[in-house]
Amino acid sequence: MKTNTATIKTYNPFNGNHLETYTVNSKSDLQEKLAFADTTFKTWKQVEITKRFELLQNLANEIFKNKSELSQLITKEMGKPILESEAEIEKCNFLIDFYIKNAVQFLQDDIIKTDAHESFISYDPLGCILAIMPWNYPFWQVFRFAIPTLTAGNVALLKHASNVTGCALAIEKLFKDAGFPEGCFQTLITDHDAIENLMEDEVVKAVSLTGSEKAGRKIAELAGKNLKSSLLELGGNNACIILKDADLDAHIDTIVSARMQNSGQSCIAAKRFIVVEEIYDDFIQKFISKTEHLKYGNPTDKDTTISCLAREDLAETLEKQVEKSIKLGAKVVIGNKRDGAYYHPTVITDVTPEMPIFKEETFGPVAAVIKVKSEDEAYKTASNSTFGLGTMVFTKDYKRASKQISKIEDGAFFINSMVKSDPRLPFGGTKNSGFGRELSKEGMLAFVNKKTVYINQ
């Protein structure tokens, strides 16, 4: 008797070609992986940190050795221009190097003087951590979770986005080839229906999700129901404030990149451009000029600077957000054309707060431009969002802008630079953009037991 075996198929979004077909893990497969993770954790947590560093260096070597192949895989599965895929792979090694150099300091006991003979805080790993990751940075977002989490002594299970299943398996292979113990990092090929069962299993101690607000609410609900900690990095609607004294000639490339990088598919991209009226016309002219020079083409070509979105349905969603905004009075300056999964770079003006392109996350190359009368109005408009990942401000008076830091509720505040993630700095959001922090010391301590130790003679 034949049984139906569930599969996942991946496709190249640029040409629609079928890439691979993968068999979905059965319930028994998932149980075996959970048991394997639990067994591995018992020994992995005892491994000396110097040995973990050796494995991390091996991992960096494997990434460097396979950079071209891995970059091509990213580009084939989600359409990222190849130069950006290469930069993503390189950034993973920057991350590894950072934790090799700093993990000892981050994890060492924190001595606290009390009435005790000796008292301190120790940082012990929790166990098996489930990671649910998105497709837009298929290596970087996994590594920024996995490297600090495993280095702290935990083990990891990865549920990656199905359209980058090849990347998920390639990441697992990198850890194996680097010499990490079997079961230290495992990829699960499954659908979202299995997540609830995984969260209920006692082997899973915590969950990290990078994804949409909707997904975040569901995972937070499951984590709360099962009394497990969670870290949520969700959507964003970042404001890019252009004050009247901004040096556009110096920063316009950065400003355009802040919206169009990764074909606009980034939670921390600049999505709302809030421009003071004195500089508005100059800004529009320069922004459009740079945008029109973006080169669309096959993402495997090194001169391609913008490509298709990762799936055609994503382009369709973006198209609907734009059309609804137009009906509410928005005006298209350039763009607003869709060819399959490719959405032409688009600049829209006369944007108001009730429009989808102002209040929702737009995941693609659409720049919503809002003219304001003053600096004060600019900051108030920027804060008018249910999201809170980051705000960027362009001005010559950085000291004046610095006075706004405490007034902006977001997880990041960048002056004369685009919001970006950096291993040396904590990364995360507020409000509907989630909670918890990745990267830096905070990311390493995200999934540890901060244990109070109190000793008297």
Image: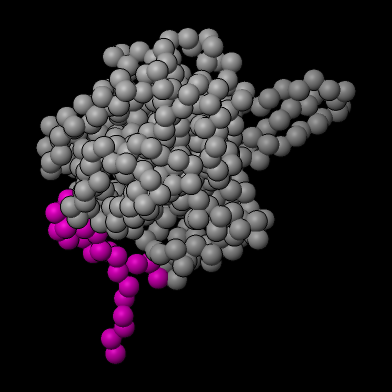
- Rendered-image quadrant of the C terminus: top right
> At x 41% / y 33%, what residue is drawn?
370
The percent position of residue 305, horizontal first and vertical second, equals 19, 34
- Viewer-proximal residue, 276 or 300? 276
> At x 55% / y 22%, what residue is drawn?
376
Residue 328 visible here: yes
> At x 34% / y 67%, what residue is drawn?
24
Is residue 19 rendered to the left or right of residue 206? left
- Viewer-proximal residue, 250 or 35? 250
Residue 435 visible here: no
Is residue 449 rendered to the left or right of residue 28? right
Question: Extreme bottom residue here?
Answer: 1
Is residue 2 rendered to the left or right of residue 353? left
Above-or-below relation of 138 to 152: below
> At x 36% / y 23%, what residue is drawn?
280
The percent position of residue 244, horizontal first and vertical second, equals 42, 16
- Asked if the stretch drawn in magenta spans residue 6, the answer is yes
Above-or-below relation of 22 to 76: below
What residue range appears in magenta?
1-26
